[in-house]
Amino acid sequence: MNGLMMNWQLTLDKILEHANRLYPHKHITTMQPDGSLHRYTYADLYRRTKRMANALVQLGIAPGDRVGTFAWNNYQHLELYYAIPGAGAVCHTLNIRLFADQLAYIVNHAEDRIVFVDGTLLPLFEKVAPDVRCVEHYVLFNAPREAAAKLPNVLFYEDLIEGADERFTWRCTDESMAMGMCYTSGTTGEPKGALYSHRSMFLHTLGENQANALGITESDIVLPVVPQFHAMAWGLPYACAAAGADMVLPGPHLRPQPLADLITNERVTVAGGVPTIWNGLYHELKQHPRDISCLRALVVGGSAMPRSLIAAYERELGVNVLHAWGMTETSPLGTVSIPLKQHEALEKGAVWDIKAKQGYPILGVELRIVDEVGRELPWDGRTMGELQVRGPWVISQYFKRDITRDYMTEDGWFRTGDVATVSPEGYMTITDRTKDLVKSGGEWISTVELESAIIGHPKVLEAAVIAVPDEKWSERPLACVVRTQDGWDLTAEELTSYLNDRVAKFWIPDRFVFIDEVPKTSVGKFDKKVLRRQFAAGELG
Ligand code: AMP
């Protein structure tokens, strides 16, 4: 027998309607390209979103059409997060850090009909446009009128808003409609599109806002440093509106100093970003101390947050770090690492051990680890296996691609490509990407853990470990280390003895190379492909 409850569609217009009804006065602050602050309210967001949705329909956008965005985190991009899905179309965020040919491939593959371009990024997009076949209009914002000559069929954002009626009936009538799309940064193979639905994003919003997850509330002021072009800015634009939290959007200002200023001046309570960003902020705050007592959670994900950095934030700056794991394919939030009540009695060091894990699955995500033949492995905190997940905000298929066993198991779990352990309490720890693991003498070495140990050395700014071929052991770890400014005299011997009582003997790299910077991918992760190439070309080692 079925229940007798309403079939109320889980569509994103409901979130914006809710925010406009209950929190119309709450603020959205954007740091503009010139460094000035633009401030408006959820009521303004609502009105302008309705106008933009109307304008899209007038331009002929029909349900299911893809509309691209090429922009920083700002209020216009936020409006598009609601206006495009509100018009029934798919908000396809384009990663501004990709190469022109990758971007052209993605725009063509997605068949974007309109692309919104942030004027500050026009020089980048100009290189993409000649290879794009499907786009009928480019819409510019943050751009002077002369910029119209740079791309074909240009319209201006503010003209569209001005010319459109505020009355609009949302066109997202069915929760299964697609609402957003994001291509994976794809360090291997062609980029692949994760296509989110209204229902998946609505449920992700509720999942993210659980008290045992990020638990954003009306009293929060949230700074998403994570780009809106990366995994829907971790869903924060929807989670904030759902909760009525103020938002602070940094625009193109992602350097440590303006971020520190924004946190202090705007009294930010929750900030989300990748470890590289928070590593930079930590050094800025050590050099130029500021009052950041307002921060209740520094949310970090996208790569492993080293334990030493978690400890440094908590011990030296009094900032609570909330480590999370997710993927573009999981909308993205999958796990969070928040110590439980039973951990209260633990000493600080043990609590940081827990926070350095990727954490427990939030309600709505199931996880398991399996061996090479797909057998489920125990949650004993030691056994490593491939991490697989399932849930209502996990992809079932990539856009315009067949379902293959490369990424979906026969029994319907998504294969993450991550290798993990899970503790008896349910805390998952990523030990590696499948392709990054080092296998030395038949034993696995976790590059993530090794990097985390190396970066604990006070003279180390960044560390990336790769596998290099070895005659005797088949593979050995090579550590590429970036020294801090004061750490110019750090030697391989010093690092070796530092690691001696921190990791297993056979984990200690035979070779350390000192480099100026670890190459990064388009979303700020270590690009080990580049390091491996450099090693093969004899530039490292
Ligand atoms: P993306 O889809 O670009 O966000 O990449 C997802 C991948 O980033 C995951 O499969 C992990 O390999 C990695 N990742 C995300 N969060 C974390 C984390 N907290 N610790 C370690 N790796 C992470």
Image (tube, helix red, strand yellow):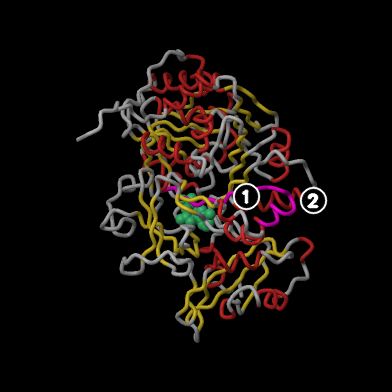
Determine if residue 102 is in view.
no
Q: Percent x, y for residue 77? A: 52, 31
Which residue is depicted at the point 70% across and 29% down? 36
Q: Residue 287: which disc? A: 2
What segment carries the magenta color?
311-329
Q: Would you say 160 lies left or right of 498 here?
A: left
Mark 2 Cα within 10 Å, few/some/many (few <14, many 20+)? few
How much space separates mark 2 and mark 1, taking CA atoms? Answer: 20 Å
Under mark 2, the amino acid is: Gln
Determine if residue 230 is in view.
yes
Which residue is depicted at the point 67% across and 57% down? 311
Which residue is at the far bottom?
A: 472
Q: Percent x, y for residue 154? A: 48, 27
Residue on which disc 1 sits? 321
Q: Percent x, y for residue 219? A: 61, 31
Between residue 24 and residue 150, name the one nearer to us: 24
Which numbered disc, 2 or 1, marks the residue closer to the eye?
A: 1
Between residue 280 and residue 413, name the one nearer to us: 413
Q: Residue 491: which disc? A: none
Which residue is depicted at the point 39% across and 66% down? 378
Between residue 220 and residue 3, name the one nearer to us: 3
Q: Would you say 66 lies left or right of 297 here?
A: left
Under mark 1, the amino acid is: Val
